[in-house]
């Protein structure tokens, strides 16, 4: 289980670094509202990745299927952007998807 824990930590760190780079650029280029929406989306992406990895870690112990709890994160993000006018949907979704480059980088590094 040590390899999985290290992979999980690297993915969370890479996602955090991607957000730390993207949010200031978005704030400077597009404004404060876009930057904060991107940050909220990035936090949602980190939560999604953490919940997904926790669900994967439980596979084999007592469960044979993945939990669906992590699927609530993007739903709540979209609902929040619909209800709260300060959160813009597209930057929030881009922030949510910042975990994807981290996955691609880890895949490339592990080859």
Image: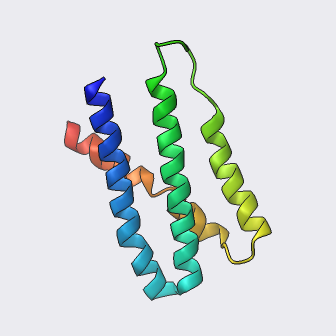
As drawn, 103 above or below 19:
above
As drawn, 36 above or below 48:
below
Residue, far right = 83
Quarter of image, res 80:
bottom right
Residue 83 left/right relative to 22:
right
Q: Nearer the viewer, residue 105 or 82?
A: 82
Q: Residue 110 placed where, x, y %?
A: 21, 37
Q: Nearer the viewer, residue 5 or 21?
A: 5
Q: Residue at x 58, y 71 (%)?
A: 37
- The quadrant in which the N terminus is found is top left
Q: Residue at x 46, y 79 (%)?
A: 26
- The quadrant in which the C terminus is found is top left
Q: Residue 7 placed where, x, y %?
A: 30, 37
Q: Residue at x 48, y 19 (%)?
A: 59
Q: Residue 11 placed where, x, y %?
A: 35, 46
Q: Residue 35 placed where, x, y %?
A: 52, 77
Task: Tally the marks.
Answer: 0
Residue 15 left/right relative to 46:
left
What's the image's color scheme? rainbow
As drawn, 41 above or below 50:
below
Q: Residue at x 52, y 48 (%)?
A: 47
Quarter of image, res 40:
bottom right
């Amino acid at each position: 289980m040590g390899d999985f824990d290290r992979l999980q930590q690297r993915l969370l760190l890479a996602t955090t670094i991607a957000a730390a780079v993207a949010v200031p650029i978005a704030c400077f280029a597009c404004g404060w509202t876009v930057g904060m929406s991107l940050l909220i989306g990035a936090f949602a992406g980190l939560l999604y990745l953490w919940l997904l990895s926790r669900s994967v870690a439980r596979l084999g112990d007592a469960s044979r299927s993945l939990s669906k709890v992590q699927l609530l994160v993007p739903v709540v993000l979209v609902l929040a952007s619909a209800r709260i006018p300060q959160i813009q949907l597209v930057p929030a979704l881009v922030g949510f998807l910042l975990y994807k480059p981290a996955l691609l980088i880890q895949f490339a590094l592990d080859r």
